[in-house]
Amino acid sequence: MKRLSYLVIILALTCTGISTAQAQNVDDILTSYFEITGGLSNWKNLKSMKMTGKMLQGGLEFPATMSQKYPNKFRMDIDIQGKKIIQAYDGKEGWMINPLAQITEPKVLTAEEVKEMEDNQMEDEFIDYKSKGHAVALDGEENIEGTDCFKVKLTKKSGDIEYHFFDKDNNVPIMVRTFAKTGPTEGQPVETFMSDYDAVGDFMLPFSMTTKFQGQTVMQIVVDSYDLNATLDDSVFALPK
Amino acid sequence: MKKLISVWLPILAAIVISPFSLFAQSSIKTSDLFGDIRARHIGPALMSGRISDIDVVNSKPEVIYVGAAGGGVWKSQSAGALFTPVFDEHTQSIGKVTIDQNHPDTVWVGTGETWVRNSVSVGDGIYKTTDGGSSWKNMGLKDSERISDIIVDPTNSNIVYVGVLGHLWNDHEERGVYKTTDGGETWVKLLYVNPQTGCADLTMDPEDPNTLYAAMWDFRRTPYSFRSGGPGSGLHKTTDGGKTWAKVTQGLPKGTLGRLAVEIAPSNRNIIYLSVEADKEEEKGLYRSDNAGESFALVNSDFNNKVRPFYFARLTVSPSNEKIVYKCGLQLIMSEDSGATFKIIDSGMHSDIHAVWIHPTDSKINIAGTDGGLYRTLDNGNTYTMFMNLPLAQYYHVSVDMEEPFNIYGGLQDNGSWRGPSKSQGGIASKDWQFVLGGDGFAAYVDSEDKNVVYAEAQGGEISRVNLLSADSKDIKPYPRVGEADFRFNWNAPIHKSSSNPKRLYFGSQFLFMSEDKGESWKRLSPDLTTNDPVRQQQKQSGGLSTDNSAAENNTTIYAIAESPLDEKLIWVGSDDGNLQVTTDGGTTWTNVSPNISGLPAKSWCTSVEPGHFDKNTIYVTFDHHRMGDIQPYLFKSTDLGKTWVSLATPDISGYALSVREDLVNENLVFLGTEFGLYISVDGGSNWGRFSNNVPKVGVRDMVIHPRDNALVLATHGRGVIIIDDLPALRALTPEVMDKPFTFFDSPQAYTSGFDFGGGWFGGAGEFVGQNPNEAPRIIYFQQKRHVFGKMFIQVFDEAGDMIKELPAGKSAGVNIVDMPTRMDKPKAAPTNNRMSLIGNVFGPDLPGGTYKAVVTKGKETFETTYTVGYDPKSPHSVEDRKLQEQTVRKLYDMTEQMAWVYDVSSKLQQQAEDLAKSQPKLAKKATAYARSVQAFKDNLVFLGGDFYVNEDERLSEKISQIYGTITRYPGRPSQSHLDRIATLEADFKVEQLKFAALTGEELQKLNSAIEKAGAEALKVQSFEAFKASE
């Protein structure tokens, strides 16, 4: 019944999108977002996740899995013609294997390379954002690819800024704008579009993600399955000894 | 659960969509329609464009910000190796860029260039970023139009002083010196003189942030004159943070002053340099105070210390040496003796210098901004290198030819006229651009009969015919005959090429001329078509305190000409003083129809005329009245030859109107260029939306639609040439389409692409390379709303009905453009540690030409379309050769997959046998023997050792993969050597396949019989089909 109830919420929100839109403040948007996508208590209980699917880049397509574990453990495996490319972070140390770049043994990443991973928290940043030291503000509205969105500015404790765009019709995020932290494009916006939200247990999760840089698609991820609260041993993320 | 959602989704969709679809046309904003249609920038950058200001992070001098006259703000984090635009969503005219050196991620940008030439743009206030340019906020002063200076108090970043030069073309009170003490939240006007006088320059005492000097300038432009200087001009000083100001006069000329530039030596607060425009020639020049502004004395009167103060009033003093001072001028000049003597820095740099930045600790290093881009010296000005990565070209006009790929012709502010291609191998680079004519460039057209002959012009009607092969240019200007008045040509005199008679050129002074003999002679087709108002013909006296007669103030001239594409006798002419003249008899009689236009201010400047392509009585016209202080867009349409008019301007349009084009195919599709970007209407001009997909808020001076390639080519005044290739998608945005939730559009013509490794070589960073058109096969569809819930994907089927690819769909509202696959999936291949083999296997073969079907699944609904991929008729490869290549690739593809299967089965058998040996000791001997023989077989097929670089080997599998890669990459006939090699490999593979058959047949059966007798589980072989289907 609970599952049915959030469908009703979607329906209600969608049909009354215009009237709710005017009365929004940022906490209303976030509350409704959590309601629609699974309920805040479920989100809080989500401690690990394994995503299996494919990655599309430059006309090529590779099987990929992404594993995350609370608080910020992360691992991505890509298979290119039998060559296993791995990038992982165990909360302290980042490492990679990339036989295509002659890195056949696990290589510890430099501090600069790890920068992007350190902040990649498993838990949605909007959950208890105040106690995490983040600031959240409604920064007006912006039209994203023809869709009017609430523009929610997330200033992380670290000082990093992200903009999350919630479709005004249903308060579901359709795009996140982050900024490259290193390299020649440092400071430039990177936009990840989410779509194909579908039910996974109690959750509604995006099954399609498209990353664009300067308006050009640079990567797409199509998710085949989510394994929520998957059993993932810490050793999965640690630098192999 | 999933099922439940799926059931609900259509209901949900129906509820959401149905109430809106009734009002679809009115509910979809025009700006929401464009979706994936995206413009591309092609530069050029080799001549760049005017730089108005530069600032650099002192503590990190590799971080450079550049403000352009019409091209926005660019940032480099690599000392100029790479520049990226960081201000595209805002007005592109920049006056001042100031970094808060105590917080270098905080940067202030004052919009509105202050080098106020005739073609200068306008700004809309002051902006601030606190994240190094990632995001900007307008902090006010929105009606200031021009900001000349911004100084952050070094002791308190919340205190900022701003010099507002203000409106150029009209009286206005938002000008003078402003101050904020709360980081820009609120502003106080500290110094104001009168509605004609603004602040041209500010400087702050390096030791006392409450002491500042402000150079106030009394100035004004009209469409036909310029005045620099007046009673409002003067130097003011405050010592209390701007509460009170005193005029500084000691030692300065007593008469009227013009534009001043003022700069305190950062290393010595007592030394102040002041550039002075005075009414007496002998009093003009550089002044210096050695007593903190108590008094000044003239120290130098060199040409560049006096020339064109309105354009060159900037001084820069070395931060580390009070004696080193640079003055911007026609050339850059530099003094090392406190201004007593200057040397001209002539190092191959473009003339007309507007900004100089000097390294804080090493005065030998500086960066200079000119009319032609940005330069840096590391050797005290002996040599300068240009940054060839700033595509800031300020185009006035653009035209195209019918070559393949088509070329683009046009002229640029102070940077001549050029020809360049719309496509080039590896992208459109500096090498691809060809110089046509010098001076300021405007209109340029290729001759209809000779692609090496181009008509181009310099300012004031200096038209030439240029032969690009011989590099000759012949003056073909018309001259007055006996008894005729002198001809008055605009700064930007119009040339028009007839579409009905390719030999016919039009050219305009106050008269309309026509030539059909390549400009050798001109026939006058009209009387004076302007107001011929003598008040507007005093350009020789223009300039104020410094006469400035450069043709920039020429007025009462023809500015726009167009012959109807439907009737060669029907010609429209617009003038810069408000006339819109039409003839229907080839010039015998003319009628001025501008008085019929209700709502048009008198004497507005006619910027473009666009006769209808569907109805000869239709005309679109733009007027621009900003030169009288009115920045509203004026866009009108008449369908009765100008007798009656309707205004098409709506509140959705921002910026004065510069150009209008009606589409060649869909008469409801209209394009409008304003000072703030490109606007598109899909309903004949009733509603407009700004096209923001990679078109910044830059002035769009001219546009042309390529009749064959269906591209819209924009001449922008600050960001070079910008092209929108997907016009057919815009044409398809009809009311019927917008009324439906989902509609496919026709797919553009596409060809098999062959294999493209890209182009270009290892040039590193440093050069701008323009984008080529997307030529991939693609499907295009429109959806009313963004797809959010439920799966949406595309499946592609070949002619046999086999699915060849599943890929993500475009999800946005409006137009979605999705590239279709050009290659099959890569073959399943055996693992390898040989690089070339792996690379060979990473790519699937090119899909053959043919008709493909694309099925879009959107939740429960599916939509189907087809598209065709042809073989390029210009390609040297015959269809027969291509078919042989395709068959050969197919054979190798199958061999690769067979090899992968053989290897996989062998590996698994070996593993099973080894496991068996461990679990069944009685069978260990037989199982181990079998495992060893399988291992020996399989290790002979594939190479897995080495370093994946220079220590590597190859076996049969690698040999097959390599020849597969070789044949795949060339779309034509494989050579005989290739075919022979393949035959050899096939024979070798047959031998191996026989061994494999034995291993998996008789030998395996023997082992399995023994296993069965022992009651254990037999070894299994996966079928090829099952292997292929597995992940």
Image (spheres, helix red, strand yellow):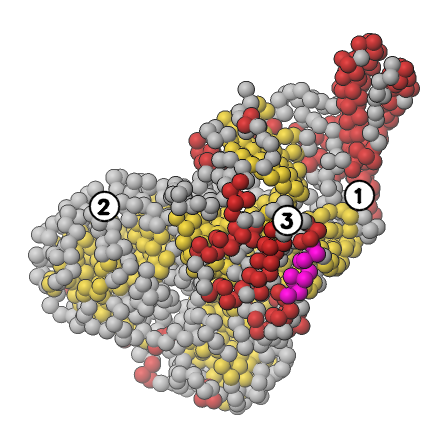
The label on residue A199 is 3
Q: Are marks 3 and 1 on the same chain?
A: no
Which quadrant of the view contains residue B416? bottom left
Q: Quadrant of the C terminus of chain B?
A: top right
- The type of residue carrying mark 1 is Glu
Residue that appears at 26% across and 61% down: B186
Q: Which residue is mark 2?
A: B318
In front of the other: label 3 or label 2? 3
Q: Position of residue B639 (x, y in %)?
A: 57, 85
User: Is B802 included in the stretch rendered in magenta?
Assistant: no
Looking at the image, residue B834 sits to the left or right of residue B914; the answer is left
Q: Amino acid at mark 3?
A: Ala
Q: Which residues lie in the magenta part? A: B6-15
Instruction: Give the Cα separation between the discs numbered 1 and 2.
Output: 68 Å
The majority secondary structure of the magenta stretch comes to helix
The subunit letter for the residue under badge 2 reads B
Q: Residue furthest front?
A: A1
Q: Amino acid at mark 2?
A: Ser
Q: Which residue is mark 1?
A: B886
The disc, 1 or 2, on the residue closer to the chain's N-terminal end is: 2
- The nearer-to-camera label among 3 and 1 is 3
Q: Taking A71 as reference, is B810 above or below it?
A: below
Can residue B764 be seen by looking at this rendering?
no
Secondary structure under tag 3 reads strand
Specify whether B288 is left or right of B562. left
